[in-house]
Image: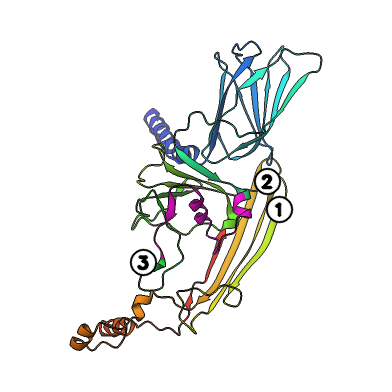
Amino acid sequence: MARRSSLLAVLGVVILGTWAKPAFPQATTTQAQLNGVVRDQSGGAVAKAAITLREVDTNSTYTTTSNTDGLYTFAIVPPGRYELTAEFSGFGKYTQTGIVLSVAQIATIDITLKVAQAGEKVVVTAETPVIEATRTEISQVIDTEQIKALPISGRLFTDFALLSPGVSVGHTSAQSPFTDPSVIRISFGGQRDLNNAVTVDGADNIMAANGSQRATPSQEAVSEFRVVNNGFGAEYGRALGGIVNIVTKSGTNELHGSVYDYLQNNATNARSILTLPGFNTLRQNQFGATLGGPIQKDKTFFFVNYEGQRRAQSPTYPGLLFAPVDSSVASLFPLGTTNFQAINLVKQDMGIPAENLSVLKTADNDNGFI
């Protein structure tokens, strides 16, 4: 019986350890961290001060106390808007509002407590970003306001990464002789676009087979993301290029939602220089809705998003495909008068369907996020 109890105890430890492991990557890559020192007016450290951090939108609270050196830390907190308070016997209550913590941020806010007067309370409103004294990487956060305000064709929010220095478009349709999907791959500092790491809420979003990015959440479901050019820590791993670290939206204590529809067509868009005369059809409709709110106020929240796309477009090809076949080649191999005809003849000979300019290329999809 004792042996069985020991085995069950060991098994319980193993299971708990297994369940605990996934929390660490999320904490280090998507959560924020807040540190600081609590001092009095003379600069001396204040030990055992009660520190409370409250998330404004969900009313979630985190508490800690300063150590003998006055140091305090909140190691794992979600990105969001916060209020910080500090209290200690004999000192006035300290409150700082307007704190915004972003994805994977390591922030520092030092606190100075003043000797208490009758009913005195110190309130500080943050007007400048909190300091990240320990961060050595080159990175930039694209927040919710930028995602909403900046125009982007196709609503692939990862294209916002191009706002960061040293980031450029990687693979494009111009590099392929045939129609290619929309660009979602980017290059950091000239590195291959397959050398990057992309995470969504701490989960790997890269396909192991070829190193390219999986389908991304809708732009409406993204809260913010951090673009890390270089100098990133070991917690990201296996990336020779850069990092795109995405955090999705969450519900709050207030019910909120949206309904949207974005239209593009050849009647309103400028004609692409890649389209042939008479083959410039474009019909794109991106539509969807979001809803978020509380399930149990201050405790449990939900957020859902649906987005659909209906797209039909005339195929586009590099102009070289429609250039005349070289006369020396044409005399040896009767493959048609243009490179396009020659390629189709070769494809037919290999049993591959030929390219047809009259067939519209479609890209229809439905995406959901919870």
The numbered dot on residue 252 is 2
User: Magenta span covers which residues?
Assistant: 146-172
Mark 1 vs 3, N-terminal side: 3
Q: Residue at x 61, y 18 (%)?
A: 38
Q: Residues within 10 Å of mark 1 (few under 14, many from 20)?
A: few
Q: Amino acid at mark 2?
A: Thr
Q: Which residue is mark 3?
A: 175
Look at 41% across and 67% down and name the residue there.
173
Mark 3 vs 2, N-terminal side: 3
Q: CB of mark 3 within 8 Å of CB of mark 2?
A: no
Q: Residues within 10 Å of mark 3 (few under 14, many from 20)?
A: few
Say which of marks 3 and 2 sits in front: 3
| Pick the front one: 359 or 343 | 343
Alpha carbon distance from label 2 to label 1? 8 Å
Residue at x 64%, y 67% (from the top left corner):
261
Whole-percent x and y of residue 37? 58, 20
- Relative image position of residue 358 (x, y in whole percent): 45, 85
What distance separates the C-alpha of mark 3 from that of mark 2?
Answer: 44 Å
The C terminus - image quarter = bottom right
Q: Read off the residue under disc 1.
A: 256
Query: Does 337 sit left or right of 115 as displayed?
Result: left
